[in-house]
Image (cartoon, rainbow, N blue to C red):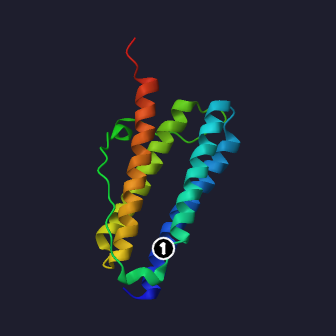
Protein backbone atom coordinates (compact mmCIF):
# COMPACT_ATOMS: atom_id res chain seq x y z
CA UNK A 1 0.00 0.00 0.00
CA UNK A 2 1.46 3.36 -1.00
CA UNK A 3 2.40 5.80 1.75
CA UNK A 4 -0.14 8.32 0.42
CA UNK A 5 -2.94 5.75 0.60
CA UNK A 6 -1.85 4.68 4.08
CA UNK A 7 -1.85 8.30 5.25
CA UNK A 8 -5.35 8.80 3.81
CA UNK A 9 -6.64 5.74 5.66
CA UNK A 10 -5.11 6.88 8.93
CA UNK A 11 -6.40 10.42 8.37
CA UNK A 12 -9.93 9.04 7.91
CA UNK A 13 -9.62 7.02 11.11
CA UNK A 14 -8.34 10.07 12.99
CA UNK A 15 -11.24 12.14 11.63
CA UNK A 16 -13.76 9.54 12.82
CA UNK A 17 -12.29 9.77 16.33
CA UNK A 18 -12.07 13.58 16.18
CA UNK A 19 -15.73 13.78 15.18
CA UNK A 20 -16.74 11.42 17.99
CA UNK A 21 -14.66 13.36 20.54
CA UNK A 22 -16.12 16.70 19.42
CA UNK A 23 -19.67 15.34 19.42
CA UNK A 24 -19.37 13.89 22.93
CA UNK A 25 -17.76 17.13 24.18
CA UNK A 26 -20.47 19.28 22.59
CA UNK A 27 -23.18 17.01 23.98
CA UNK A 28 -21.60 17.19 27.46
CA UNK A 29 -22.04 20.96 27.29
CA UNK A 30 -25.69 20.54 26.25
CA UNK A 31 -26.79 17.95 28.82
CA UNK A 32 -28.07 19.28 32.15
CA UNK A 33 -28.28 15.98 34.04
CA UNK A 34 -25.00 15.74 36.02
CA UNK A 35 -24.70 11.98 35.47
CA UNK A 36 -25.33 12.31 31.73
CA UNK A 37 -22.84 15.18 31.53
CA UNK A 38 -20.19 13.12 33.38
CA UNK A 39 -20.78 10.09 31.14
CA UNK A 40 -20.46 12.17 27.97
CA UNK A 41 -17.18 13.65 29.22
CA UNK A 42 -15.88 10.14 29.92
CA UNK A 43 -16.84 9.05 26.41
CA UNK A 44 -15.08 12.11 24.96
CA UNK A 45 -11.88 11.27 26.85
CA UNK A 46 -11.95 7.67 25.60
CA UNK A 47 -12.33 8.89 22.01
CA UNK A 48 -9.39 11.24 22.50
CA UNK A 49 -7.22 8.34 23.71
CA UNK A 50 -8.21 6.25 20.69
CA UNK A 51 -7.41 9.17 18.38
CA UNK A 52 -3.96 9.55 19.96
CA UNK A 53 -3.28 5.84 19.43
CA UNK A 54 -3.96 6.21 15.71
CA UNK A 55 -1.90 9.39 15.49
CA UNK A 56 1.05 7.57 17.08
CA UNK A 57 0.91 4.74 14.53
CA UNK A 58 4.36 4.35 12.96
CA UNK A 59 3.96 4.22 9.20
CA UNK A 60 7.50 2.90 8.88
CA UNK A 61 6.37 -0.35 10.57
CA UNK A 62 4.68 -1.56 7.40
CA UNK A 63 7.02 -4.56 7.17
CA UNK A 64 6.16 -5.88 10.65
CA UNK A 65 3.28 -8.20 11.45
CA UNK A 66 1.52 -9.34 14.62
CA UNK A 67 -2.04 -10.27 15.56
CA UNK A 68 -3.61 -9.34 18.87
CA UNK A 69 -7.33 -9.57 18.20
CA UNK A 70 -9.48 -10.66 21.16
CA UNK A 71 -12.85 -12.32 20.95
CA UNK A 72 -15.63 -10.15 22.41
CA UNK A 73 -19.31 -10.97 22.25
CA UNK A 74 -21.43 -8.18 20.74
CA UNK A 75 -24.88 -8.13 22.34
CA UNK A 76 -26.35 -5.89 19.58
CA UNK A 77 -28.52 -4.12 22.17
CA UNK A 78 -28.29 -0.90 20.16
CA UNK A 79 -30.20 -2.54 17.31
CA UNK A 80 -33.36 -2.58 19.42
CA UNK A 81 -33.16 0.95 20.79
CA UNK A 82 -34.15 4.29 19.31
CA UNK A 83 -31.44 6.93 19.17
CA UNK A 84 -32.26 10.49 20.12
CA UNK A 85 -30.27 13.67 19.71
CA UNK A 86 -28.67 14.80 22.95
CA UNK A 87 -30.57 17.75 24.43
CA UNK A 88 -30.45 19.57 27.76
CA UNK A 89 -33.12 17.14 28.98
CA UNK A 90 -31.25 13.98 27.98
CA UNK A 91 -30.99 11.31 30.64
CA UNK A 92 -28.18 8.86 31.32
CA UNK A 93 -30.24 6.27 29.44
CA UNK A 94 -30.48 8.59 26.40
CA UNK A 95 -26.71 9.16 26.53
CA UNK A 96 -25.93 5.45 26.75
CA UNK A 97 -28.21 4.62 23.81
CA UNK A 98 -26.68 7.43 21.78
CA UNK A 99 -23.18 6.18 22.63
CA UNK A 100 -24.02 2.59 21.67
CA UNK A 101 -25.34 3.78 18.30
CA UNK A 102 -22.27 5.96 17.68
CA UNK A 103 -19.84 3.21 18.71
CA UNK A 104 -21.58 0.74 16.39
CA UNK A 105 -21.00 3.13 13.47
CA UNK A 106 -17.34 3.58 14.39
CA UNK A 107 -16.92 -0.18 14.81
CA UNK A 108 -18.48 -0.75 11.36
CA UNK A 109 -16.11 1.81 9.81
CA UNK A 110 -13.03 0.15 11.33
CA UNK A 111 -14.29 -3.30 10.41
CA UNK A 112 -14.70 -2.17 6.80
CA UNK A 113 -11.21 -0.66 6.77
CA UNK A 114 -9.83 -3.92 8.17
CA UNK A 115 -11.46 -5.84 5.32
CA UNK A 116 -10.06 -3.58 2.56
CA UNK A 117 -6.56 -3.02 3.97
CA UNK A 118 -3.79 -4.99 2.30
CA UNK A 119 -0.79 -4.09 4.45
CA UNK A 120 -0.17 -6.27 7.51
CA UNK A 121 0.57 -3.35 9.86
CA UNK A 122 -2.60 -1.54 8.80
CA UNK A 123 -4.60 -4.73 9.19
CA UNK A 124 -3.08 -5.13 12.65
CA UNK A 125 -3.94 -1.54 13.57
CA UNK A 126 -7.53 -1.97 12.44
CA UNK A 127 -7.78 -5.38 14.13
CA UNK A 128 -6.82 -3.65 17.37
CA UNK A 129 -9.22 -0.75 16.75
CA UNK A 130 -12.07 -3.13 15.87
CA UNK A 131 -11.43 -5.13 19.03
CA UNK A 132 -11.22 -1.98 21.17
CA UNK A 133 -14.40 -0.48 19.70
CA UNK A 134 -16.30 -3.70 20.16
CA UNK A 135 -15.01 -4.07 23.71
CA UNK A 136 -16.00 -0.45 24.47
CA UNK A 137 -19.44 -0.90 22.90
CA UNK A 138 -20.02 -4.14 24.82
CA UNK A 139 -18.99 -2.37 28.03
CA UNK A 140 -21.64 0.30 27.41
CA UNK A 141 -24.20 -2.37 26.51
CA UNK A 142 -23.42 -4.35 29.66
CA UNK A 143 -23.69 -1.28 31.88
CA UNK A 144 -26.92 -0.33 30.15
CA UNK A 145 -28.34 -3.80 30.60
CA UNK A 146 -27.26 -3.96 34.25
CA UNK A 147 -28.77 -0.57 35.04
CA UNK A 148 -31.92 -0.43 32.92
CA UNK A 149 -32.96 -4.05 32.54
CA UNK A 150 -32.88 -5.11 36.17
CA UNK A 151 -35.53 -7.59 37.20
CA UNK A 152 -37.53 -6.30 40.14
Would you place residue 132 above or below residue 78 in this image?
below
| Residue 47 drawn at (x, y percent) | 55, 55
Would you place residue 103 above or below residue 139 in this image?
below
Q: Nearer the viewer, residue 2 or 91?
A: 2
Question: Residue 28 is drawn in which quadrant?
Answer: top right
**Which secondary structure lies at badge 1?**
helix
Q: Quadrant of the N terminus?
A: bottom left
Question: Residue 78 is drawn in which quadrant?
Answer: top left
Q: Is residue 19 something that shows in the picture?
A: yes
Report the residue at 45% width, 87% height from top.
3
| Residue 82 drawn at (x, y percent) | 43, 37
Would you place residue 101 above or below residue 119 in this image?
above
Report the residue at 39% width, 42% height from top.
138
Report the residue at 57% width, 46% height from top.
43
The residue where tag 1 is placed is: 10
Q: Horizontally, is 124 left or right of 47 in the view?
A: left
Q: Is residue 33 something that shows in the picture?
A: no
| Residue 104 drawn at (x, y percent) | 40, 50
Would you place residue 98 above or below residue 33 in this image?
below
Amino acid sequence: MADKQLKEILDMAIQVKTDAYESYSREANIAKDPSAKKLLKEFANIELKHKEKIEKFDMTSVEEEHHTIKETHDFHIEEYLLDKEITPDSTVQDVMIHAMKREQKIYAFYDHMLRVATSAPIKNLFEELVAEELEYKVKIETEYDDYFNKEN
